[in-house]
Amino acid sequence: MSFFKKVLASVGVGSAKVDTQLESGQIAVGEELRGVVHIQGGQLEQQIDSIYLYIKTSYVKEENDRKVTVVADVAKFRITDEFLLAAGERTEIPFAFTVPEYTPVSLRNSAVWLETGLDIKMAVDPTDRDYVDILPHPHMQVILDALDELGFRLREVTNDYAPRIGGKLPFIQEFEFVPTTHFRGALDELEVVFFLRGDELELYLQIDRRARGIRGLFSEAAGMDESFVRVAIPGDELRRGPSVVARNLKQLISNYS
């Protein structure tokens, strides 16, 4: 094995390559993601310390009065221990893992991807990126359908830096809705953050009332036109369907509009 081949492999030339193929590119939060990692050996034998899979996304953070985009690791999975990969060897490693309940969903411009990497000492680690369409958990979908029944149109989905309330992640995924029927004229917007707690779904609601008259304008200027509501909805209620949940949400939102 020549010295020059070792040097080239250490900087990624002629080294191992990795390609991950997913059983399905669309998966819901809480479901099992399956696939196979294909590895192609390079021009020389290499010691692979591990193969890892990351679920990744990005969020927006304000730094020095400007917004920056930060890549975040949502979850990391090690799918194999160390092994020796011969020159030119082809190998396949199947994997399966559950998409964590705190994984953000792929709506609007919120992208989620799976990144595969080989951990090789003293060398550039080959990686592979595959975008995944993460669907809402069934409990979350009930809420989205209920809000749709109430005439709320989803305007924007953003991942925003919020380490105090993000739980396992340094950000929260925020859903911004605008009213089109029931609450049109009463609300400017409704912002929702979802937290799955086992069989229960917790919602953080920011209810933004529309200013009415001079007093309302002063309240809006002072930030008093917004109400923050935290509510937990049990799984039994969610399983009764969007229409039942919509009636309860309508009453709740009406109390603050």
Image: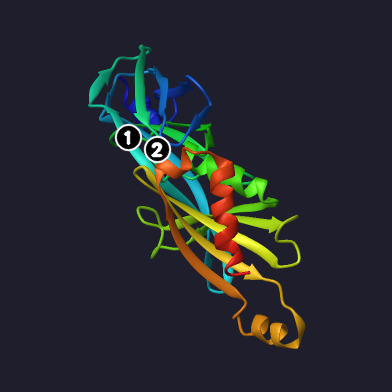
Query: Can I make out residue 110 in this image?
Result: no
> Taking 20 as reference, is 85 left or right?
left
**Quadrant (top left/top right/bottom left/bottom right) for the N terminus:** top left
Residue 120 appears anywhere in the view? yes
Residue 47, picture quadrant? top left
In this view, 165 is above or below 23: below
Mark 1, residues whose alpha carbon is within 10 Å: few (<14), some, or many (≥20)? some
- Image x and y of residue 81, in percent: 23, 27
Task: Measuring from the top left, give residue 256's x and y in whole percent.
Answer: 58, 70
Q: Residue drawn at (75%, 87%), measured in percent from left and top?
A: 214
Residue at point 54% right, 53% down?
A: 248
Q: Are marks 2 and 1 in contact (CB under 8 Å)?
A: yes
Residue at 43 percent of width and 39 percent of height = 55
Query: What type is the residue that disc 2 sits on?
Result: Tyr
x and y, in percent, of residue 95 in the image: 35, 22
The foreground one among 58 and 133 is 133
Instruction: Identify the residue position indicated by label 2 in the image.
Output: 54
Q: Is residue 47 above or below residue 56?
A: above
Q: CA distance from mark 2 to mark 1?
A: 6 Å
Q: In what element is the residue under mark 2? A: strand
Image disc number at residue 77:
1
Q: Is residue 107 left or right of residue 86?
A: right
Classify residue 101 by image quadrant.
top left
Query: Of the numbered discs in the image, which one, if any, rests on residue 210?
Result: none
Identified at 46% across, 23% down, the residue is 19
Q: Nearer the viewer, residue 207 or 72?
A: 207
Q: Amino acid at mark 1?
A: Phe
Choose between 75 and 6: the one closer to the eye: 75
Disc 1 secondary structure class:
strand
User: x, y (%) of residue 100?
Assistant: 38, 39
Residue 14 falls in which quadrant of the image?
top left
Give left or right: position of 154 versus 191: right
